[in-house]
């Protein structure tokens, strides 16, 4: 893997991204830099990644030089054609694929719901199954129907493949489809039945700003926006490039892949290099106006029917293109129009470049303005910038940085310049097609200090950040080799404390506070303290920190340096993930005040994979655990494996020797009513005719164990390939076959020697 490091792409006002008019330059790849600087080359060593450790110069030029960074690189030979099915995200991204199933929440509370999307070529999931996408970021689903309606249907519209059209005031996600609330009642539709869905009330503003916050710092590296042949668009600050070499039929095969992980996705997506049509670049403090919520205040024509204005494309191009320049971000409008855009909090300035659309040629005659907007009178106010008269024969005009610090809205006005037009100019509104290229809003990093980390660190948005320590904290990313994904890294300044506070009502569905991080060789630097109603509460960890650090230093790190394979059954040892758990079950039924303090000490970096309130049992029903008539631990064990001195089954304990026995813990929470198990062990109890159902909670206690099986008379009636100590336990309720004589619980051998699992809250229902 091409390893990453962050570099700063300097501040500057925006620019237009790209190419020149046909015939002005030659070369397959067109590069546009800040201002009007351009470059054309026949060969590209690779689409440059701002966060890469090294970026190869192009024609001897540093494309991320602070004062003139690249804004767009365009492969002119690649044709973009959208291929259904598609999932359109609220930040303007597009996926080739279709939702298949809601992802399990695993007992996490208050986190964004995610849906598993099965990707279509050329997109590929790294784990070979699919990617988990935030449902609150999905704006539109275009199904297997080949129709691609333009413009999109109204929000709340659901078109089904059988021809039905539904108007939904509310659309909710279900495990395998959608539930649409219509005036005639609730209609259920499977994902495979959808032709076109436009979701109502999707937060475009939050989605657009999230791309900046997800980078971790508003002064950090640039954001990439990749467009593919298939119409897919992916925006990310987390990307890498890998060259894979192999041999096929005696010939060397080289495949270049890009791995990107957008903010709305919890998994990376693999992209073949040859599928990329263009890549746009922007600073992390820049938010495209073309992605923000907008309302059309006026759109009229003197000649012909009004044209709908377009986002991020122009009338004749997949890019926003004038005769001389083009951009991957922008707006295409026509005189006369007024479009009102909502601005994000912390906005400082706005800038754009305006010119006649490439389809207008040398024609058209317009005047464009940026103005304040009065939401009370619903009228444009003070003009902030005026382009003057623009003709198709003129170069585009740059607005420069327009001060909008105190505004919540801005209106873009396209007027026909019929009155007083220059001699020879088109009259009325003939060919008055306009492009607003790279319309970018600059966000003040100091004004959004509290919001930035909340977006970059999973789960942190549920907490109030207290004190000045957060002003010095920085967020970056790392590639997790074992998990094949990017994770956030929180850098804590020396001698500073990061404090988090929140109120929570504790019940059985959220009685564990979890923070997932990574082990450090200097693990003692991870100083965490939780107070509940002002009183300290001790934590448990998924592994002993000292043992874990030693194992990684002595065994795992040398293996990774040599690129050696871990022996089969021990792959989980590659993971350096460490979970801290605080057991809150004694506070059930209470509203409590939680205060988590992270002490900086000498200053260090803390991997922040996730934090949440959750249940130790991932599928715990709202009614709680079912009651049993006969407890498993009240029955004698009639048969058990020979554990060769490692300890027999012990009620409510792990089966180690007496010196090392520990209680059964799932996510650090003690559970009783069962037995612990080590690798390659079993035990059995006799069944009675009145036993109709077996109930148990099963999960990993140490590392990963499995397969876990329930057998009746040597016939498997339930099986799970692997249980992990980092995952919640699972409640199972199994109907018992009539006539069964013996029930056996088994922990298989496909796990590491030190692994352990357990059954708790187990018994039989008569």
Image (tube, grey):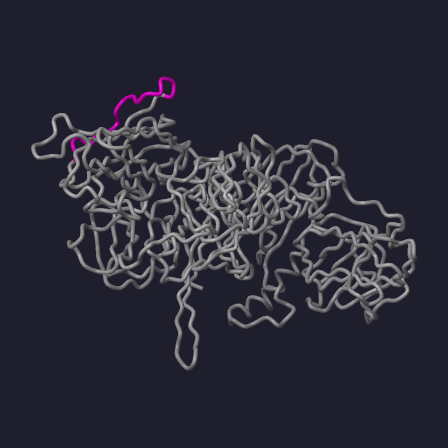
Quadrant in which the N terminus appears:
bottom left
Q: Does the image show residue 450?
A: no
Nearest the viewer among 286 and 466 is: 286
Of 517 and 137, which appears nearest the observer? 137
149 with respect to 453 (left or right):
left
> Would you identify the image quadrant in which residue 42 lies?
bottom left
Find residue 400 and report its image quarter.
Answer: top left
Residue 7 location, x and y as percent? 37, 52
Q: Name the outermost residue toward the front.
A: 163
Q: Which residue is pictured at 20% across the width and 49% down the height?
A: 37
With respect to residue 461, does 257 lie above or below?
below
Dominant secondary structure (helix, strand or loop) of the stretch shown in magenta? strand
Q: Given the current orientation, which residue lies at the most extreme top position? A: 377
Query: How many marks overall?
Result: 0
Image quadrant in which you'd find residue 752: bottom right
Q: Is residue 389 visible?
A: yes
Q: Position of residue 43 (x, y in %)?
A: 26, 64
Give the percent coordinates (x, y) of residue 345: 42, 31
Q: Is residue 396 left or right of residue 84?
A: left
- Image coordinates of residue 740 in percent, x first then y, are 88, 62
Q: Is residue 98 magenta?
A: no
Residue extending furthest left? 423
Give the magenta part as a residue range: 375-390
């Amino acid at each position: 893997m091409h390893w990453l490091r962050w570099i700063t792409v300097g501040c500057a006002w925006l620019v237009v991204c790209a190419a020149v008019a046909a015939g002005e330059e030659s070369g397959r790849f067109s590069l546009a830099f800040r201002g009007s600087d351009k470059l054309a080359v026949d060969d590209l060593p690779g689409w440059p990644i701002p966060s890469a450790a090294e970026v190869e110069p192009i024609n001897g030029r540093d494309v991320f030089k602070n004062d003139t960074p690249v804004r767009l690189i365009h492969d002119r030979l690649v044709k973009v054609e959208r291929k259904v099915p598609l999932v359109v995200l609220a930040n303007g991204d597009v996926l080739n694929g279709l939702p298949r199933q809601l992802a399990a929440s695993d007992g996490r509370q208050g986190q964004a719901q995610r849906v598993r999307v099965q990707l279509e070529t050329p997109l590929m999931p790294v784990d070979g199954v699919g990617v988990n996408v935030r449902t609150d970021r999905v704006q539109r689903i275009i199904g297997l129907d080949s129709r691609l309606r333009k413009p999109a249907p109204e929000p709340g519209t659901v078109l089904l493949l059988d021809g039905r059209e539904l108007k939904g005031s509310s659309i909710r996600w279900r495990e395998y489809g959608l539930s649409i609330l219509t005036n005639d009642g609730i209609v259920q539709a499977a994902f495979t039945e959808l032709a076109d869905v436009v979701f109502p009330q999707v937060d475009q503003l939050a989605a657009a700003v999230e791309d900046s916050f997800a980078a971790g710092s508003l002064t950090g590296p640039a954001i990439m926006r990749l467009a593919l042949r298939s119409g897919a668009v992916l925006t990310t600050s987390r990307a890498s490039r890998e060259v894979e070499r192999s041999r096929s039929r005696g010939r060397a095969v080289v495949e270049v892949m890009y791995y990107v992980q957008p903010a709305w996705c919890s998994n990376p997506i693999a992209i073949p290099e040859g599928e990329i049509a263009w890549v746009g670049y922007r600073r992390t403090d820049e938010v495209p106006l073309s992605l923000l919520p907008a309302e059309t205040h006026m759109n009229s024509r003197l000649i012909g029917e009004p044209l709908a204005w377009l986002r991020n494309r122009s009338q004749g191009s997949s890019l926003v293109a004038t005769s001389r320049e083009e951009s991957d971000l922008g707006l295409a409008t026509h005189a006369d129009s007024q479009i009102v855009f909502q601005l994000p909090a912390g906005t400082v300035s706005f800038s754009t470049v305006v010119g006649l659309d490439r389809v207008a040629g040398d024609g058209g005659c317009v005047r464009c303005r940026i103005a304040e907007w009065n939401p009370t009178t619903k009228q444009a106010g003070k003009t902030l910038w005026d382009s003057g008269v623009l003709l198709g024969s003129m170069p585009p005009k740059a607005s420069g940085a327009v001060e909008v610090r105190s505004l919540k809205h801005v209106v873009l006005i396209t007027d026909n310049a019929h009155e007083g037009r220059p001699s020879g100019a088109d009259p009325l509104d003939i060919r008055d097609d306009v492009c607003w290229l790279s319309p970018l809003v600059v966000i003040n990093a100091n004004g959004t200090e509290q919001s930035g980390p909340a977006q970059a660190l999973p789960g942190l948005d549920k907490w109030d950040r207290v004190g000045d320590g957060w002003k010095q904290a920085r967020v970056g990313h790392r590639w997790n080799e074992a998990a094949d994904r990017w994770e956030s890294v929180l850098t804590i300044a020396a001698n500073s404390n990061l404090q988090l506070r929140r109120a929570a009502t504790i019940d059985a569905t959220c009685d564990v506070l979890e923070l997932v991080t990574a082990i450090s060789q200097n693990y003692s630097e991870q100083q965490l303290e939780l107070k509940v109603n002002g009183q300290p509460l001790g934590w448990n960890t998924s592994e002993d920190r000292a043992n874990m650090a030693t194992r990684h230093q002595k065994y795992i790190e040398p293996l990774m340096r040599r690129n050696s394979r871990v022996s089969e059954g021990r792959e989980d040892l590659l993971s350096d993930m460490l979970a801290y758990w605080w057991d809150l079950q004694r506070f059930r039924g209470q509203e409590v005040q939680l205060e988590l303090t992270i002490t900086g000490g000498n200053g260090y970096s803390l991997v922040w994979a996730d934090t949440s309130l959750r249940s130790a049992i991932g599928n715990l029903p709202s009614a709680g655990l079912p009651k049993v008539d006969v407890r498993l631990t009240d029955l004698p064990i009639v048969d058990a494996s020979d554990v060769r001195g490692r300890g027999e089954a012990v009620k409510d304990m792990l089966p180690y020797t007496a010196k090392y026995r520990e209680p059964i813990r799932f996510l650090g929470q003690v559970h009783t009513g069962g037995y612990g198990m080590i690798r390659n062990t079993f035990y059995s109890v006799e069944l009675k005719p009145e036993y109709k159902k077996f109930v148990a909670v099963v999960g990993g206690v140490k590392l990963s164990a499995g397969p876990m099986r329930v057998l009746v008379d040597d016939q498997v009636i339930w099986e799970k390939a692997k249980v992990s100590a980092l995952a919640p336990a699972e409640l199972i309720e199994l109907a018992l076959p009539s006539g069964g004589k013996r029930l056996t619980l088994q922990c298989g051998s496909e796990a590491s020697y030190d692994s352990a699992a357990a059954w708790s809250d187990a018994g039989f229902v008569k």
